[in-house]
Image (spheres, rainbow, N blue to C red):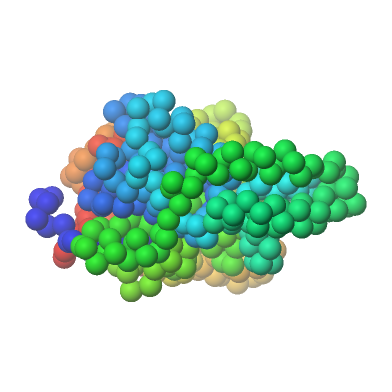
């Protein structure tokens, strides 16, 4: 596509449409070639985006994936919870790899902070759930949920508080007392001391203050100047706190509509919603998963998906549960996000299978339903209804045009479009930037 065909002042939102781990990082990195700014608008460093550029793998958790493109501005919006220790650690790791970060990273002053007691509460809660037999949620143990709780309760320490040591100290004492009470009185854990937390925060503040910004206003001005902006979602729609498989969800809104609130811009600035999905389905942690296969037994299809797809979490290293593509769940995500087009990733993982299946609906309590239910117990009771397609022996790995795909692979993708009611705009055929088939560019004028 010629550069003259790319619209100016056009903004794209990239969101996961499954349970996360769909390959958003690669797609954001690829699209950043046509953007001047990339924004993270929710989640924290529980997100993991892996990029492969000329064979070199880079894992990002908090910093927008656009950081791997020189000259691109990177923004962390107010909807993100920030662990200052992790942020600076990630910056230093990128700098050691030769990536310049600090002059083009802008952090919203309104971001809530994740502090050491949030991490301890998160871990202690999971331990208590496990010991009591009530079942673990499957959190990453990084303090994300407790930090969002403090935000909603209007008691959070925010990035802007680092500018005011006395104010920070007062708020920290109050918040620490609250969490220490929970740690010692209910969670069977140890209390944390004020001084080490305060002193570390003040040291970190000196490195963070130069990157503090009014992100919403900066994005407004960038848009007025005709810049293209990319909004990068974390996790996936089915982990959304409102619309996911509750309570096995994350603590933020992962859907496209939250890009406006989580970045501080108006919804009229969101022009194209690009949903990312794998050619099959994976899930990390606990929770219902209708199309899950037996992915731990060698010789099974599930094992093929797990091993060929290298399905381990970027953040935790946990093995991802694997199953066939759930188009009925995908349909729910298409509707919630108002998806303009879909990018289907990891098509090459299906290479070599004799047949490919796709869930198009469920049997539930004697009835047939064509969309993922809202009730978790009903999702658990769902029995998938599959359509079966002939597989392909040819490789799709590295294909860059539609015509290079085997006929059976093209037929499978066409049927996916029909079932979900949204067009496939891109197909990813490998981990590298260049392993991409572009059918309709999200930044195109037409």
Q: Would you identify the image quadrant in which residue 200 lies?
A: top right
Q: Is residue 267 above or below residue 38?
A: below
**Which residue corresponds to the image point at 31% horizontal and 52% vertical from the top-left?**
37
Q: Position of residue 336 (x, y in %)?
A: 46, 69
Q: Is residue 351 above or below residue 66?
A: above
**Which residue corresponds to the image point at 69% horizontal and 67% vertical from the top-left?**
153
Q: Is residue 341 visible?
A: no
**Which residue corresponds to the image point at 39% horizontal and 68% vertical from the top-left?**
265
192 left or right, relative to 26:
right
433 left or right, relative to 17:
left
Query: Is residue 55 or residue 180 the one in the foreground?
Result: 180
Q: Position of residue 350 (x, y in %)?
A: 40, 39
Q: Quick one: which residue is furthest to the front in this view?
A: 166
**Which residue corresponds to the image point at 33% horizontal and 74% vertical from the top-left?**
268
Q: Is residue 41 above or below residue 55?
A: below
Q: Would you identify the image quadrant in which residue 264 lies?
A: bottom left
């Amino acid at each position: 596509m010629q550069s003259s065909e790319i619209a100016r002042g056009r903004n794209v939102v990239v969101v996961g449409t499954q349970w996360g781990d769909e390959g958003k990082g690669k797609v954001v990195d690829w699209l950043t070639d046509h953007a001047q700014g990339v924004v993270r608008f929710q989640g924290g460093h529980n997100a993991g985006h892996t990029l492969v550029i000329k064979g070199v793998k880079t894992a990002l958790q908090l910093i927008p994936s656009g950081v791997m493109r020189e000259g691109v501005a990177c923004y962390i919006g107010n909807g993100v919870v920030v662990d200052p220790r992790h942020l600076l650690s990630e910056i230093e790791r990128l700098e050691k790899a030769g990536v310049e970060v600090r002059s083009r990273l802008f952090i919203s002053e309104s971001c809530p902070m994740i502090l050491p007691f949030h991490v301890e509460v998160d871990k202690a809660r999971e331990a208590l759930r496990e010991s009591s037999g009530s079942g673990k949620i499957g959190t990453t143990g990084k303090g994300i949920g407790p930090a969002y709780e403090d935000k909603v309760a209007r008691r959070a320490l925010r990035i802007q508080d680092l500018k005011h040591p006395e104010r920070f100290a007062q708020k920290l004492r109050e918040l620490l007392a609250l969490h220490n009470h929970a740690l010692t009185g209910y969670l069977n854990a140890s209390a944390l001391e004020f001084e080490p937390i305060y002193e570390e925060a003040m040291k970190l503040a000196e490195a963070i203050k130069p990157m503090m910004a009014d992100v919403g206003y900066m994005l407004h001005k960038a848009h007025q100047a005709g810049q293209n902006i990319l909004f990068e979602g974390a996790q996936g729609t089915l982990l959304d706190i409102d619309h996911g498989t509750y309570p096995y969800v994350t603590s933020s809104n992962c859907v496209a509509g939250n890009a406006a609130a989580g970045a501080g811009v108006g919804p009229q600035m969101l022009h194209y919603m690009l949903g990312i999905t794998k050619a099959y389905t994976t899930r990390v942690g606990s929770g219902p998963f209708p199309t899950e296969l037996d992915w731990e037994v060698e010789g099974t299809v599930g094992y093929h998906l797990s091993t060929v797809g290298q399905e381990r979490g970027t953040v935790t290293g946990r093995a991802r549960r694997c199953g066939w593509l759930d188009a009925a769940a995908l349909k729910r995500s298409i509707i919630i996000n108002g998806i303009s087009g879909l990018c289907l990733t990891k098509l090459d993982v299906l290479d070599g299978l004799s047949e490919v299946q796709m869930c198009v609906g469920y049997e539930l309590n004697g009835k047939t339903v064509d969309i993922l239910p809202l009730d978790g117990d009903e999702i658990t009771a769902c029995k998938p209804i599959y359509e079966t397609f002939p597989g392909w022996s040819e490789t799709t790995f590295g294909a860059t045009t539609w015509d290079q795909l085997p006929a059976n692979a093209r037929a499978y993708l066409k049927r996916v479009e029909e079932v979900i009611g949204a067009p496939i705009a891109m197909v990813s055929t490998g981990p590298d930037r260049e392993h991409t088939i572009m059918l309709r560019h999200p930044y195109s004028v037409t």
